[in-house]
Amino acid sequence: MRLDKLLSNLGFGSRKEVKQLLKSGSVKVNDTVVKDAKMHVDPVNEIVTLNGERIEYREFVYLMMNKPPGVLSATEDTRDETVIDLLQIEDQVYNPFPVGRLDKDTEGLLVITNDGQLSHRLLSPKKHVPKTYFAVIEGEVTERDIDAFKKGVTLEDGYLTKPGELKILKSGITSDIELTITEGKFHQVKRMFEAVGKRVVYLKRLSMGPLLLDETLELGEYRELTDEEVQMLKGYQAK
């Protein structure tokens, strides 16, 4: 990787600003001052320092966010705040993106990474990665709904969903439920309940594959995934 690209990618300034840093003699590679912006370096095996401090390079970043309502699951938008806007600049420099989408008004677990291979693994329809949601439903959810979801329901556009596992936590004028599905059609949870004559009034994602939402995260907060969590996601095989 070119030295100027490495430094700019890690948030040390624009290419132009990085060139000024190099000219000042502030950057060393393996204890040798380097002023050539075009020099290629191996950031994993070579030691790059700026003003005497070693620059830690990571190819990938893996984050878990408790997405708040009102924020888009997108990398950028001209009108609304996105989940990337909530990240610190030191995480934004890796150009991460949300893995899949949560609706604007939906809360909960969102994985954010720049690892395209992992994203594909979690989102590919062929992988059948389960996603579990907690929802508050307007109307009484019954055993009849459980049976309907178990068979798959037909959405308003004629699409028959794959079977979903519906659990009733509380039933009444409004009902609390958990729903596990293995696909991610647009507004799928809301549309599945509309198909049985009910309306979702609150929705929160609790898990994605083996990864559970860290309940200590406040809405809008995020943290890095642990090495164990990353390896768990990479090695996960849906049943």
Image (tube, rainbow, N blue to C red):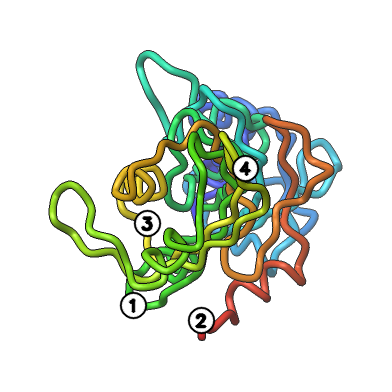
Crowdedness near tag 4: few (<14), some (14–19) or many (≥20) residues, C-alpha within 10 Å: many
Q: Which residue is denoted by mark 1 in the rendering?
A: 126
Is the residue under label 4 in contact with that under label 1 (CB below 8 Å)? no
Which one is earlier in the sequence, the residue at label 1 or at label 4? Answer: 4
Residue 107 x, y percent position in the rendering:
58, 37
Nearer to the camera, 125 or 59: 125
Which one is earlier in the sequence, the residue at label 2 or at label 1? Answer: 1
Q: Which residue is denoted by mark 3 in the rendering?
A: 184
Tell me the CA gap for discs 4 and 3: 15 Å
Amino acid type at image mark 3: Gly
Tell me the CA gap for discs 2 and 1: 10 Å
Crowdedness near tag 1: few (<14), some (14–19) or many (≥20) residues, C-alpha within 10 Å: few
Q: Which residue is denoted by mark 2 in the rendering?
A: 238
* Residue 229 visible somewhere in the drawing: yes
Amino acid type at image mark 4: Gly
Q: Is residue 7 above or below residue 68?
A: below
Farthest residue toward the left?
158
Which one is earlier in the sequence, the residue at label 1 or at label 3? Answer: 1
Residue 192 x, y percent position in the rendering:
35, 51
Counting every numbered tag in the picture gives: 4
Which one is earlier in the sequence, the residue at label 4 or at label 3? Answer: 4
Q: Which residue is denoted by mark 4 in the rendering?
A: 108
* Residue 7 visible somewhere in the drawing: no
